[in-house]
Image (tube, rainbow, N blue to C red):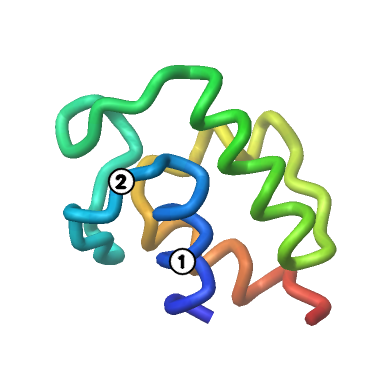
Amino acid sequence: MFERIQRLFNRVTGITDFVVTPSTRLSRKDIDLSSFTLIQLFCELEDEFDIEISNADIKKMKTVGDILSYLEKHNRK
């Protein structure tokens, strides 16, 4: 599952020279993503994993590891 998240992250952001790890923060401290790109990333995650992620849950996710944990708990695919 983590590999799918990595591929999706690289595709959506266009960042190919950055290694995504579970500890990668979604804030500008690790990567310089716009708010639009973050929204696009979560939309793509919902499509890829056939899941709906609430805005409240999105706000709680601070790292790629948080996304992974959430998907492991809620994924149907």
Front residue of 41 and 68:
41
x 42%, y 40%: residue: 13
* Among the 4 quarters of the image, the one containing residue 73: bottom right
> Tag 1, which secondary structure?
helix
Q: Amino acid at mark 1?
A: Arg
Q: Decide: marks 1, 2 in contact (CB < 8 A)? A: no
> Tag 2, which secondary structure?
loop
> Badge 2: how crowded within 10 Å, few (<14), some, or many (20+)?
few
Q: Amino acid at mark 2?
A: Ile
What is the tally of numbered marks visible in this picture?
2
Toward the top, the furthest residue is 35
Left or right: 45, with 65 as reference point: right
Measure how far apart labels 1 and 2 are at the Cα level.
Answer: 10 Å
> Badge 1: how crowded within 10 Å, few (<14), some, or many (20+)?
few
Residue of label 2: 15
Q: Is residue 20 above or below residue 77?
A: above
* Among the 4 quarters of the image, the one containing residue 2: bottom left
Percent x, y for residue 16? 28, 54
x 20%, y 62%: residue: 19
Left or right: 71, with 77 as reference point: left
x 35%, y 49%: residue: 63
Front residue of 15 and 25:
15
Quarter in which the C terminus is drawn: bottom right
Q: Is residue 64 above or below residue 39?
A: below
x 81%, y 59%: residue: 51
Front residue of 44 and 77:
44
Percent x, y for residue 60? 50, 38
Left or right: 10, with 8 as reference point: left
Q: Which of the two discs, 1 and 2, labels the residue nearer the N terminus?
A: 1
Front residue of 40 and 56:
40
Residue of label 1: 7
